[in-house]
Image (tube, rainbow, N blue to C red):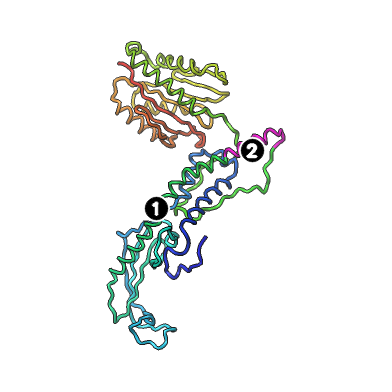
């Protein structure tokens, strides 16, 4: 990976090829996915694992902190044997005279090894400098009988280095932009392969025992962000596959409820005096009409005052809470109630918020702030809707059992 040119000579941007480094970093990410213990990978929420991989294998471009630079000077013996203006008999040996050394130190952020990486665009006269920890050091030795404009030399050197860093930045940005999709593909491919293997092994009808010498390590990235994140917490216990309610069915259920809201808007007199339980009954009728009699043989049912549940075995496929808007605190309690149910690993849920008389902006702001502040909140999903949000929460006590929760706000006639 690294070239043979001695970095101590001070040559920057020549030691190795940046394109190769970035490809190696991407390959290291894929090897890490392949190297994770199977159950460890399967028990980790894919989105959390992807986020970790993006952080671990993303490359931080170098940023010079020129506003923090500083200079120092000291007396030194200067070797003038290469000074063509002096008469020197033997230029093979050092010729030292009194002089001054000026050092300009420029702090930087980013991966120090990038100073030695050549971008696809470069020139044949690379800059020189010394890299010490998180500082770029420009060093100038001047004989006492000479005068040099050090500031002009520094400005030219910084401009040259900045040019090379700009050439790098486009390649690094492209790598970082491609990383989420590449990580997601690597995770999905291995998960699919492992689940298929598990099904084939189970079909044998013979107890399965893990080999003692099975690999369980993973490679470190070649070029990475300085602060390497930790893998998301997950158990290495045997992974038990669980059914997943297809996103298409989830969206269908949400559409049924939104269509019901249109009925409410078109016939306000019929719904003006209804409470939560009465409104919920109307949603249940429509949902059962669409989902009853499917292969699961399950129907939406009521197990609590405002619950809408679709069950598979001992766990819930879909959960919905119907609540009138009574402020952020009450909405937080609705989230708590929703998360109190036992769901599949990839649970689906909805909170139907009936709003009577409160400004829509107030309701939407209260929902957003309450959801993001919840202890089980994980992330906001990109879901474009004029009166709703979509979030991912984790189940109580298990960060890898995720629940996708869509919040819909319906206006109920006053």
Q: Total of numbered circles in the picture?
A: 2
Say which residue appears at 50% left-offset and 37% top-offset: 399
User: Pointer 1: residues within 10 angstroms few (<14), some, or many (20+)?
Assistant: few
- Callout 2 secondary element: helix
Residue 179 x/y as whole percent: 47, 46
Q: Residue furthest right?
A: 206
* Residue 302 at least partly seen: no
In the image, residue 151 lies at what x, y percent? Answer: 28, 69
On whether residue 206 falls in the magenta region, the answer is yes
Name the residue located 31 percent from the left edge and 60 percent from the top edge: 66
What secondary structure predominates along the stretch shown in magenta?
helix
Disc 1/disc 2 C-alpha distance (Å): 41 Å
Q: In the figure, residue 103 lies in which quadrant?
A: bottom left
Residue 349 or 386: which is nearer the viewer?
A: 386
Q: Position of residue 244 (x, y in %)?
A: 54, 29
Q: Which residues are magenta?
A: 191-207
Mark earlier in primary sequence (1, 2)? 1
Q: Which residue is mark 1?
A: 170
Residue occupying image coordinates x 42% and y 20%: 257
Q: Is 126 a magenta residue?
A: no
| Residue, far bottom | 89
**60 lies left or right of 71:** right
Looking at the rendered structure, the secondary structure element under dot 1 is helix
Q: Identify the image quadrant of the C terminus.
A: top left
* Mark 2 lies on residue: 197
Q: Position of residue 165 (x, y in %)?
A: 38, 58
Give the vertical position of 134 relative to 249 (above or below): below
């Amino acid at each position: 990976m690294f070239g043979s040119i001695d970095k101590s000579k001070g040559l920057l941007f020549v030691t190795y090829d940046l394109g190769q480094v970035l490809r190696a970093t991407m390959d290291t990410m894929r090897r890490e996915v392949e190297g994770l213990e199977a159950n460890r990978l399967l028990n980790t929420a894919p989105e959390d694992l992807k986020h970790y991989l993006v952080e671990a294998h993303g490359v931080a471009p170098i940023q010079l902190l020129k506003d923090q630079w500083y200079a120092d000077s000291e007396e030194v013996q200067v070797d003038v044997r290469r000074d063509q203006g002096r008469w020197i008999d033997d230029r093979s040996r050092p010729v030292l005279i009194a002089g001054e050394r000026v050092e300009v130190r420029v702090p930087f952020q980013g991966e120090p090894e990038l100073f030695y990486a050549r971008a696809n665009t470069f020139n044949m006269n690379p800059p020189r400098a010394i890299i010490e920890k998180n500082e770029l050091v420009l060093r100038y030795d001047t004989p006492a009988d000479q005068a040099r404009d050090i500031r002009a030399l520094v400005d030219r050197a910084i401009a040259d280095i900045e040019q090379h860093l700009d050439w790098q930045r486009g390649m690094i940005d492209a790598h970082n932009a491609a990383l989420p999709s590449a990580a997601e593909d690597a995770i999905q491919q291995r998960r699919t392969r492992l689940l298929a293997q598990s099904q084939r092994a189970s079909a044998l009808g013979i107890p399965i025992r893990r080999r003692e010498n099975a690999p369980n390590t993973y490679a470190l990235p070649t070029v990475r962000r300085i602060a390497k994140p930790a893998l998301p917490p997950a158990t290495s216990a045997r992974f038990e596959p669980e059914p997943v309610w297809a996103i298409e069915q989830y969206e269908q259920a949400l559409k049924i409820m939104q269509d019901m809201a249109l009925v409410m808007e078109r016939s306000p007199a019929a719904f003006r005096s209804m409470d939560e339980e009465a409104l919920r009954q109307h949603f249940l009728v429509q949902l059962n009409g669409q989902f009853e009699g499917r292969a699961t043989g399950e129907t939406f049912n009521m197990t609590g005052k405002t619950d809408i549940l679709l069950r598979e075995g001992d766990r819930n496929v879909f959960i919905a809470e119907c609540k009138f808007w009574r402020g952020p605190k009450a909405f937080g309690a609705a989230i708590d109630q929703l998360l109190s149910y036992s769901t599949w690993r990839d649970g689906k849920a909805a909170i139907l918020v009936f709003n009577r008389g409160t400004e829509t902006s107030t309701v939407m702001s209260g929902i957003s702030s309450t959801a993001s502040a919840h202890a089980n909140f994980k992330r906001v999903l990109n879901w474009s809707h004029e009166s709703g949000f979509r979030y991912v929460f984790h189940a109580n006590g298990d960060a890898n059992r995720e629940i996708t929760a869509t919040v819909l706000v319906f206006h109920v006639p006053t």
